[in-house]
C-alpha cells in the first residue's frame, strides 16, 4: 500500500510538470478583462506568455500544486479505497460515490493550494502588471493572505471548489472503471499500458467537462480582490455578473487549454506510476489494473 501511494505521488508530480503550463493559460483566459482582453485564444496566450515572460512564465505558481500533491494523493487514494471497502461491492455506482467522497475531502488542501496557484499565475502580468511583486512564492502567498484575511482568506472559493471537485472525481473514477472494463484491461495483455493510458486520459477529459463552468467561477472568485476592489459577493453574484457582461461563452473560457492538458497530464501520471512500479516490483506480478490508478490535476 505504501509503495502504491509513493508511486502515485511520483506520477502525480510528473502530471503537474506536464500540465501546469496549460493550467496557467486556462487561468489567464478565465480571469482576463472582457473590456481589454490580453489574449485572443489558447495558442495566442501561450505565445504571449513565452514571449513576454519566457517559458518559465508558464510555470508560475507550480510550487503550490507540488506542495499539496502528497497530501492530496493520500486523501484521494485513502478515502476512495476505504469507501469502496465500506460499500462492500466494486460497482460503477460505488466507484462514483467513492470518487465523489475523495473529491470532497481533498478540497481542504486543494482550495488553498489553488488559491495560491491562481494568485501566483496572475502576479505581474497584464492588468496586474502595475502591481508590485507581492508574493515571493506559494508559501509566502498563503502566509500573507492568512495575515491579512485569516483562515477565511486562505479558504476563499471553498464552496465553489467543493461543488466542482465532488462530482468531478466521481465521474473520473466512474469513467476510468467503465473504460478499463470495456477495454478488457488485463495485466497479461501486451497492450495494457496503451489501454490504461487511453482510459486515464479520457477519464480526465470527462471529469473536466462535467464541472468546467464551476471551475471558471472558482477561478474568478479566487482572483477577485487582487486589483484591490472585490467585484463579487458570492457564487451566484459571480455567475450573474459574468453572464450579464459576457454571455454564456464565459463559462467555457480556457476550456481548450484545459482539455489539451487533461489527456497528457493523466497519461504522464499513469506512465510514471507504471514505470515506477515495474522498477520497484520487477519480481512481482501486478494483479489489478487499478494498482497504478492515475490521479487527475485539480488539480
Image (cartoon, rainbow, N blue to C red):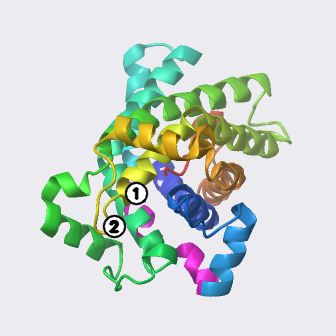
Indicate whether residue 54 is drawn in magenta. yes
Q: Residue 157 placed where, x, y %?
A: 33, 47
Rendered-image quadrant of the N terminus: top left
- Residue 254 visible in rendering: yes
In x, y percent, where is residue 278?
66, 55
* Residue 257 x, y percent position in the rendering: 67, 56
Judged by its main secondary structure, the magenta piece is helix
* Front residue of this view, candidates 26 and 138: 26
The extreme right residue here reads: 190
In this rendering, is residue 69 above or below 198?
A: below
Residue 178 inside the magenta-drawn segment = no
The mark found on residue 296 in the picture is none
Q: Which residue is mark 2?
A: 226
Image spot of residue 190 (x, y percent): 86, 42
Is the residue marked by circle 2 packed among few (<14), some (14-19), or many (20+) residues within 10 Å? few
Query: Circle 2 sits in a helix, a strand or a loop, which is it?
Result: loop
Q: Residue at x 60, y 37 (%)?
A: 248
- What residue do we see at 59% from left, 25% from top? 174
Residue in the picture at 50% in, 40% down: 244
Number of labelled discs?
Answer: 2
Q: Residue 175 occupies which quadrant of the picture?
A: top right
SS category of the residue bearing label 1: helix
In the picture, measured across the screen, residue 76 lies left or right of residue 58, that is left
**Mark 2 vs 1, N-terminal side:** 1
Q: Which residues are magenta?
A: 53-70
Q: Find residue 289 and report its image quarter.
A: top right
Residue labelled with disc 1: 114
Amino acid at each position: 500500500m505504501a509503495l502504491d501511494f509513493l508511486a502515485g505521488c511520483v506520477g502525480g508530480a510528473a502530471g503537474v510538470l506536464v500540465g501546469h503550463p496549460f493550467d496557467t493559460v486556462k487561468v489567464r483566459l478565465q480571469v482576463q478583462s472582457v473590456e481589454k482582453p490580453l489574449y485572443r485564444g489558447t495558442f495566442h496566450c501561450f505565445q504571449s506568455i513565452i514571449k513576454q515572460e519566457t517559458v518559465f512564465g508558464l510555470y508560475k505558481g507550480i510550487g503550490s500544486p507540488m506542495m499539496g500533491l502528497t497530501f492530496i494523493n493520500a486523501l484521494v487514494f485513502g478515502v476512495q479505497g476505504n469507501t469502496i471497502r465500506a460499500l462492500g461491492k466494486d460497482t460503477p455506482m460505488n466507484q462514483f460515490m467513492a470518487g465523489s467522497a475523495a473529491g470532497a475531502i481533498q478540497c481542504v488542501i486543494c482550495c488553498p493550494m489553488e488559491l495560491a496557484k491562481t494568485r501566483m499565475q496572475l502576479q505581474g502580468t497584464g492588468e496586474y502588471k502595475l502591481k508590485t511583486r507581492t508574493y515571493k512564492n506559494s508559501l509566502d502567498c498563503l502566509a500573507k493572505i492568512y495575515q491579512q484575511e485569516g483562515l477565511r482568506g486562505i479558504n476563499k472559493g471553498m464552496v465553489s471548489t467543493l461543488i466542482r471537485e465532488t462530482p468531478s472525481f466521481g465521474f473520473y473514477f466512474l469513467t476510468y472503471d467503465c473504460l478499463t472494463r470495456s477495454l478488457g484491461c488485463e495485466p497479461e495483455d501486451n497492450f495494457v499500458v496503451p489501454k490504461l493510458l487511453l482510459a486515464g486520459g479520457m477519464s480526465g477529459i470527462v471529469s473536466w467537462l462535467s464541472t468546467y463552468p464551476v471551475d471558471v467561477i472558482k477561478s474568478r472568485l479566487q482572483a477577485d480582490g487582487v486589483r484591490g476592489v472585490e467585484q463579487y459577493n458570492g457564487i451566484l453574484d459571480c455567475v450573474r455578473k459574468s453572464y450579464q457582461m459576457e454571455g454564456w461563452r464565459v463559462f467555457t473560457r480556457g476550456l481548450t487549454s484545459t482539455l489539451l492538458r487533461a489527456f497528457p497530464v493523466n497519461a504522464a501520471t499513469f506512465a510514471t506510476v507504471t514505470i515506477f512500479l515495474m522498477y520497484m516490483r520487477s519480481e512481482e506480478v501486478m494483479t489489478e489494473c487499478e494498482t497504478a490508478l492515475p490521479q487527475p490535476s485539480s488539480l
